[in-house]
Image (cartoon, rainbow, N blue to C red):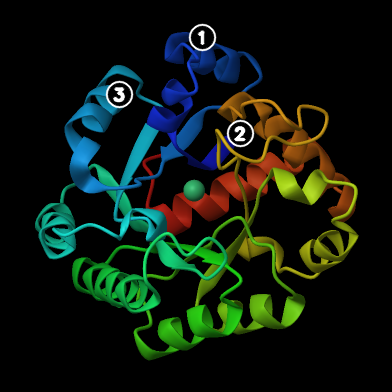
């Protein structure tokens, strides 16, 4: 079973012991996790984690929340410089957040477009964050379409946005919020996603699924989200894990 989107260093910041987190994930059958970058600043530390835990794959990018920095261009240049590195399976997380607005919108747009260009140039997929920015996210992807596809991660929008993303070569990834009581519309969307374009993730340490809602999320909890999505699709959790594994392996060119 794969957790296609987690932030290991952010979990550590929540004062969990990473060795325990990884051991617990292994115990429930998590065989791979994609550690998604917030910024290139901690690249060295994340490389060390990936060296220590063979199931960890890495991405590199500047998160929309981390874009408001005077040296943004230097950070993007670092992403560009390292993008071809064999250990990097995707560019991101990037995208637009019109909800929290931690960075000015023009800055977020600049960083998003630049990272889409980097993804195109290095032939890797892109991991896209979208909060309250449906139409702008789609418009930018339409303008700078990553040739190797990507993910609309933690998908929380309506089916029309999923359909437009699918047309642009994007995969649709569901996180713990799909298990929430008030997410019935999102569950209906999940049923309509083609099985070969579906991913499952934790976005840990955020958005812990029911019945762990409110706790610090960890990759091991991905099991609960698999169970809910599998139930929606009328397959077993093991069958869904197999489907997502194939999809992630194809998209991120993971070694089998
Ligand atoms: Ni994330």
The front one of 133 and 47 is: 133
- For mark 3, what is the residue? 49
Q: Could you say which disc has been placed on residue 1 in the image?
A: 2
Judge whether 175 appears above or below 31 on screen. below
Q: Earlier in the sequence, mark 2 or mark 3?
A: 2
Secondary element under disc 1, as helix, strand or loop, is helix
Q: Quadrant of the N terminus?
A: top right
The image position of residue 152, as x and y in percent, is 55, 65
Q: Could you say which disc has been placed on residue 20 in the image?
A: 1
Tell me what residue is drawn at x 74 percent, y 36 percent. Answer: 209
The image position of residue 226, as x and y in percent, is 74, 40
- Location of residue 124 by image quarter: bottom left
Dot 1, crowdedness within 10 Å: few (<14), some or many (≥20)? few
Kindly report which numbered mark, 1 or 2, lies closer to the viewer in this rendering.
1
Tell me what residue is drawn at x 42 percent, y 30 percent. Answer: 8
Secondary element under disc 3, as helix, strand or loop, is helix
Q: Earlier in the sequence, mark 1 or mark 3?
A: 1
Q: Is residue 168 visible?
A: no
Gap between marks 2 and 3 measured at Cα: 19 Å
């Amino acid at each position: 079973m794969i957790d296609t989107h987690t932030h290991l260093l952010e979990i550590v910041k929540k004062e969990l012991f990473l060795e325990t987190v990884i051991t617990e994930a292994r115990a429930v059958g998590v065989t791979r996790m994609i550690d998604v970058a917030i910024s290139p600043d901690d690249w060295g530390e994340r490389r060390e984690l990936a060296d220590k835990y063979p199931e960890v794959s890495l991405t590199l990018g500047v998160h929309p929340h981390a874009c408001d920095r005077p040296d943004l261009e230097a950070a993007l240049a670092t992403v560009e410089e390292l993008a071809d590195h064999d250990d990097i399976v995707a560019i991101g997380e990037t995208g637009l957040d019109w909800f929290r607005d931690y960075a000015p919108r023009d800055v977020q747009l600049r960083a998003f477009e630049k990272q889409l260009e980097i993804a195109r140039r290095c032939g890797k997929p892109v991991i896209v964050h979208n909060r309250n920015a449906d139409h702008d996210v789609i418009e930018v992807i339409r303008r700078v379409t990553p040739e190797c596809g990507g993910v609309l991660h933690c998908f929380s929008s309506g089916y029309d946005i999923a359909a437009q993303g699918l047309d642009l070569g994007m995969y649709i990834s569901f996180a713990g919020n799909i298990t929430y009581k008030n997410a019935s519309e999102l569950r209906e969307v999940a049923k309509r996603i083609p099985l070969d374009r579906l991913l499952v993730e934790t976005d840990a340490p955020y958005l812990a699924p029911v019945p762990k809602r409110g706790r610090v999320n960890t990759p091991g909890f991905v099991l609960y989200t698999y169970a809910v999505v599998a139930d929606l699709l009328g397959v077993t959790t093991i069958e869904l894990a197999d489907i997502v594994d194939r999809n992630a392996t194809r998209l991120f060119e993971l070694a089998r």
